[in-house]
Image (spheres, rainbow, N blue to C red):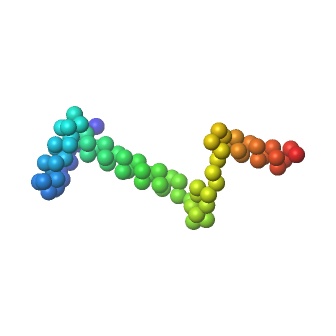
Amino acid sequence: MNTKLTLSIDKDVIDAAKEYAKSQGRSLSNVIEEYLKSVTKRKRKEKAYKFNSIIEELSGSVKLPVNKTYDDVMSEALVEKYLK
């Protein structure tokens, strides 16, 4: 369901945004809606994946082999740990 929204934005910004939307074959409303969706989606993901500071510091410190996924590496590590 669409709801009307009134914004106060500098006229030059509106004019430039309208030109951009037109060059993309989209309405200004569509451009703004898609932008707001992307911003709010990103924020929801950040909240959903908020880890403690130690995990955040370690993030990215392990590089996986090009031909293996995380699940492959974990499976091999579990086999090594428990079956050998």
Quadrant the N terminus occupies: top left
Q: Residue furthest bottom?
A: 53
Instruction: Residue at 31% x, 46% y: name it.
Output: 35
Residue 71 falls in which quadrant of the image?
top right
Residue at horizontal 35 percent and vertical 45 percent from the top = 37
**Front-most of 13 and 8?**
13
Residue 35 visible to the viewer: yes
Which of 13 and 62 lies nearest the eye of the viewer? 62
Q: How many marks?
A: 0
Q: Dividing the picture into quarters, in which one does residue 34 lie?
A: top left
**Residue 68: image location, x then y, percent:** 66, 40
Q: Residue at x 42, y 54 (%)?
A: 43
- Is 36 on the left or on the right of 53, as rendered? left
As drawn, which residue projects farthest toward the right?
84
Name which residue lies at 66% across and 45% down.
65
Task: Determine the residue located farthest toward the left in the rendered image.
Answer: 11
Does residue 27 appear anywhere in the picture?
no
Q: Is residue 65 above or below residue 57?
A: above
Question: Horizontal and vertical percent for residue 84?
Answer: 88, 46
Q: Pinpoint residue 18: horizontal percent, then vertical percent.
A: 16, 44
Q: Is residue 68 left or right of residue 18?
A: right
Q: Residue furthest top?
A: 25
